[in-house]
């Protein structure tokens, strides 16, 4: 690329920013109509979004946060999960994201959740449209908006609400950065940094890392391809400033989150297997042409689910979208500086998606921070954004006078089709070599569904690609500018039809009663005056497959109150569903999750609610709805006085004592207190009562004849502080995971208050970021350099070819090795790269007999 930099020439006048008009309004109307059609039941509030992570995590988190906002509280501690959880620090509730305040305080949570998701998807496409309009006309910009807004990445993560919230920031950030580069003003840097901060506030830090990677690559590329002068350092400096400012502005969120990460199970990073588990396998190549090539969860035909988290493997952008992207790097885009970057990013993103299938990830888990960023397939974000930009240029070329060759696009589709055919023939071989292997009615139904789904998808895609290529060929061969412009509008419409029809069943909705009418188990627990805390464990999946093939009653899945569902109805629970939890709590669970160790008694779990398959372990019980409720007679009060302490130095020693002490755990407090104020033989008599119980404030009144420890069976967290009769007191870890405070004899009033660890430091740093933003807003602009982003870079075709060759070389070197006999052999990375057809491979799908 050094040669490319010296070959930079003035901008090609072919690229020009046209004024906005009625065509833009029409394009945005088409985009809005497509989103509304896909989410229709959710848009008109006839159905509520649910399923998978929405049910397990995202809705319950937001239900708690919304209730607190309506009560006039900004409660950063959630008492309903994990015996108390630092929900703000966990971050996925999106405490500081703008949509939370636009929607959740003013309407029912399920309605706000619907609109939160839909508006995020809509804004992603609309912002992509606005960004691309700087470079191309409305029809072309709409094509890119469709590819990025409802391409495979969106559908792979629709149930990951925080990722969908964060996705809209990506095009806004790039748009703002390019504006600053073009105008020489720092205001765009501030806007881009605010967009990046909103990603952090949305609650998915991996999206921030992926976006920061794009900005870093883009800034470096602009510096390399700049001619002599200030722009060579100014443009990378602006990109770096955006990243630094975004980090500063968002410190109020990420510093508490980092503090929690450092004491979570992920603190030591991930293993290689965990990091690379969701790598995009080469056998998934056919899904680039036919999204349903290996079935879908909606139809209960996704037979590869289990080999991967299959729903996250959706990289579908459509054959037409890929063809248009290739057209985009020809003609005026061939040596165009702006288009060149996106073509290089597409190559890099596609390579990194492969994860464990290249040697690039062999030691990636050892990299700080990045080593905790799992699922390489998520680099599809880079690929999707790049394809959107290139396809927009492709449509622009077809809409305007000038020769356009489609042979390259046709060859690309032909190569993909041949390779896909060979892969499908290999993977589906058991269908005809062992036709009698699967004879269960359950399997035969799915055979039929898979065949219909595959046939319909193949026919649909063939029709769309044919129509698209015919329109493109007609436009390319015409010298009539008006005709070319009209034909170009067919292309974004076809892309939208392609992507929307391929994912039409991927927005599962349910009767709003799923969220508005509490399950029978909730009503039963609320009616029991002895209720303290619940343990829930079900035997059904939160995302039961096959809803597009046969009716499924989803409401009973709620009854056992599994995952984080207790929080959806304001019940205290000892469970949740996130890796971002205290390692102390996990160590405690591991230590006492054995008969006789008193786990549920110590945690003050008064009720166990389980599914049918688990009821034998919790007797006596009574059926309530689709669940079975067991009342735990040994549950201890949440606040209680304890003596006879067993002093330990740290959590590891505490775990060892809990494992060996057995039933004595109920009467002997295991506490980490180096001062050892209470004799180990001291018996305690007294009482403790909770007189104030709010999420961030708890008051306990006690009275005892002698000194004692007050134990509160809520999770220990460094964000909690305590006073005893107004005097600050130390909170010690009790039973490894809970809160203990030493008390002298007599009556006392103990006040516990919470503020997330790192919150003040983060607030101070964010204040510095706001001050820096104010300075940059009024900083004098540099001399603008309009048009430089579309400068001609003569070395680009060669650089692109070299990058593509390097990518292929990396894949080949990763796939093969030399054996001891100096013979080529398949490398271990690729030995399980291809899977033969089978029913029953799934994690939850493909059960022979669904319960």
Image (tube, rainbow, N blue to C red):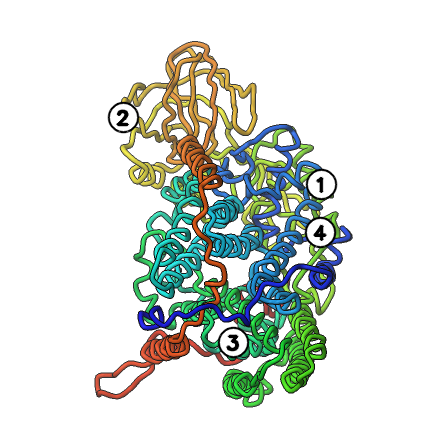
**Rendered residue at 38%/66% (across/down):** 225
Q: Which image quadrant for residue 311?
A: bottom right
Q: Position of residue 652 (x, y in %)?
A: 30, 40
In the depicted structure, whether residue 70 falls above or below residue 411: above
Label located before the other in sequence (1 or 3): 1
Q: In front of the other: label 2 or label 4?
A: 4
Q: CA distance from mark 4 to mark 3?
A: 47 Å
From the image, tell me which residue sits under label 1: 108
Secondary structure of the residue carrying numbered label 1: loop
Dot 4: within a 10 Å radius of its alpha carbon, few (fewer than 14), some, or many (20 or more) residues?
many
Q: Position of residue 296 (x, y in %)?
A: 61, 70
- Residue matched to label 3: 332
Image point (58%, 76%), residue name? 324
Please give left or right for residue 627 compared with residue 744 in the image: right
Q: Secondary structure at mark 3?
A: helix
Q: Is residue 576 visible?
A: no
Q: Position of residue 595 (x, y in %)?
A: 44, 44
Q: Residue at x 43, y 76 (%)?
A: 833
What label sits on residue 674 in the rendered view? 2
């Amino acid at each position: 690329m050094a040669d490319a930099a010296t070959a930079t020439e003035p901008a090609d006048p072919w690229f020009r920013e046209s004024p906005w008009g009625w065509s833009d309004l029409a394009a945005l109307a088409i985009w809005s109509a497509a989103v509304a059609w896909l989410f229709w039941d959710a848009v008109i509030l006839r159905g509520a979004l649910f399923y998978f992570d929405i049910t397990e995590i995202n809705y319950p988190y937001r239900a708690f946060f919304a209730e607190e906002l309506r009560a006039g509280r900004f409660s950063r501690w959630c008492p309903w999960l994990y015996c108390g959880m630092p929900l703000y620090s966990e971050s996925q509730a999106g405490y500081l994201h703008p949509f939370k305040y636009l929607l959740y305080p003013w309407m029912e949570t399920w309605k706000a959740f619907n609109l939160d998701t839909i508006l995020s998807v809509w804004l992603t496409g609309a912002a992509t449209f606005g960004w691309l309009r700087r470079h191309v006309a409305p029809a072309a910009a709409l094509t890119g908006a469709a590819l990025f807004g409802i391409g495979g990445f969106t559908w792979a993560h629709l149930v990951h609400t925080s990722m969908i919230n964060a996705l809209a920031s990506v095009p806004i950030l790039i748009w703002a950065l390019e504006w600053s580069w073009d105008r020489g003003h720092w205001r765009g840097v501030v806007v881009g940094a605010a967009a990046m901060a909103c990603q952090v506030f949305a609650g998915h830090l991996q999206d921030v890392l992926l976006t920061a990677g794009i900005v870093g690559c883009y800034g470096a590329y602009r510096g390399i391809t700049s001619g002599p002068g200030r722009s060579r350092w100014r443009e990378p400096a602006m990109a770096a400033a955006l990243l630094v400012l975004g980090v500063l502005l968002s410190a109020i969120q990420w510093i508490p989150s980092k503090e929690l990460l450092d004491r979570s199970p992920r603190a030591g990073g991930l293993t290689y297997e965990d990091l690379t588990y969701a790598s995009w396998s080469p056998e998934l190549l056919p899904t680039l042409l036919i999204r349903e090539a290996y079935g879908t969860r909606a139809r209960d035909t996704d037979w590869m689910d289990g080999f991967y988290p299959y729903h996250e493997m959706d990289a579908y952008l459509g054959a037409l979208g890929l063809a248009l992207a290739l057209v985009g790097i020809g003609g005026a885009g061939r040596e165009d500086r702006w288009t060149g970057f996106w073509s290089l990013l597409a190559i890099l993103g596609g390579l990194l998606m492969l994860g464990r299938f290249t040697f690039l990830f062999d030691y990636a888990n050892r990299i700080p921070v990045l080593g905790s960023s799992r699922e390489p397939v998520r680099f599809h974000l880079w690929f999707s954004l790049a394809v959107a930009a290139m396809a927009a240029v492709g449509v622009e070329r077809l809409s305007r006078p000038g020769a356009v060759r489609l042979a390259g696009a046709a060859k690309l589709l032909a190569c993909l089709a041949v390779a896909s055919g060979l892969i499908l023939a290999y993977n589906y071989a058991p269908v005809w070599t062992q036709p009698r292997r699967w004879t269960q009615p359950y399997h035969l139904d799915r055979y039929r569904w898979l065949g219909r789904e595959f046939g319909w998808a193949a026919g649909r895609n063939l029709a769309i690609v044919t129509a698209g290529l015919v329109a493109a060929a007609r436009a390319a061969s015409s010298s009539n500018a008006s005709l070319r412009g009209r034909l170009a509008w067919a292309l974004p419409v076809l892309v939208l039809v392609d992507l929307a029809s391929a994912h039409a069943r991927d927005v599962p909705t349910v009767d709003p009663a799923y969220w508005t009418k509490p399950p029978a188990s909730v009503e039963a627990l609320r009616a029991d005056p002895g209720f303290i805390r619940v343990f829930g464990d079900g035997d059904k999946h939160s995302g039961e497959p096959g809803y597009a093939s046969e009716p499924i009653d989803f409401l009973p899945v709620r009854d056992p109150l599994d995952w984080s569902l207790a929080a959806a109805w304001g019940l205290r629970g000892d469970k949740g569903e996130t890796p971002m939890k205290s390692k102390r709590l996990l160590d405690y669970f591991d230590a006492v999750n054995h008969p006789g160790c008193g786990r549920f008694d110590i945690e003050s779990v008064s009720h166990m609610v389980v599914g049918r398959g688990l009821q034998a372990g919790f007797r006596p019980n009574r059926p309530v709805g689709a669940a079975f409720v067991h009342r735990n007679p040994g549950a201890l009060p949440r606040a209680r006085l304890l003596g006879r302490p067993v002093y330990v130095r740290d959590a590891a020693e505490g775990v060892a004592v809990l494992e060996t002490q057995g039933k004595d755990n109920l009467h002997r407090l295991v506490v980490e207190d180096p001062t050892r104020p209470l004799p180990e033989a001291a018996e305690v008599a007294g009482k403790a009562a909770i007189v104030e119980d709010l999420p961030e404030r708890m008051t306990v009144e006690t009275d005892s004849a002698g000194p004692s420890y007050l134990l509160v069976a809520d999770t220990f967290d460094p964000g909690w502080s305590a006073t005893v009769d107004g005097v600050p007191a130390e909170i010690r870890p009790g039973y490894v995971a809970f809160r203990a405070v030493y008390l002298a004899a007599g009556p006392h009033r103990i006040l516990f208050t919470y503020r997330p660890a790192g919150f003040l430091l983060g607030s101070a740093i964010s204040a510095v970021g706001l001050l820096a933003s104010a300075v940059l807003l009024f900083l004098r602009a540099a001399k603008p350099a309009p048009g430089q982003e579309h400068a001609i870079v003569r070395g680009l075709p060669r650089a692109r070819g070299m990058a593509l060759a390097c990518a292929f070389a990396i894949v080949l070197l990763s796939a093969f090795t030399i054996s001891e006999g100096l013979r080529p052999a398949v490398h271990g990375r690729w030995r399980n790269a291809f899977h033969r057809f089978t029913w029953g491979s799934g994690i939850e799908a493909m059960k022979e007999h669904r319960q």
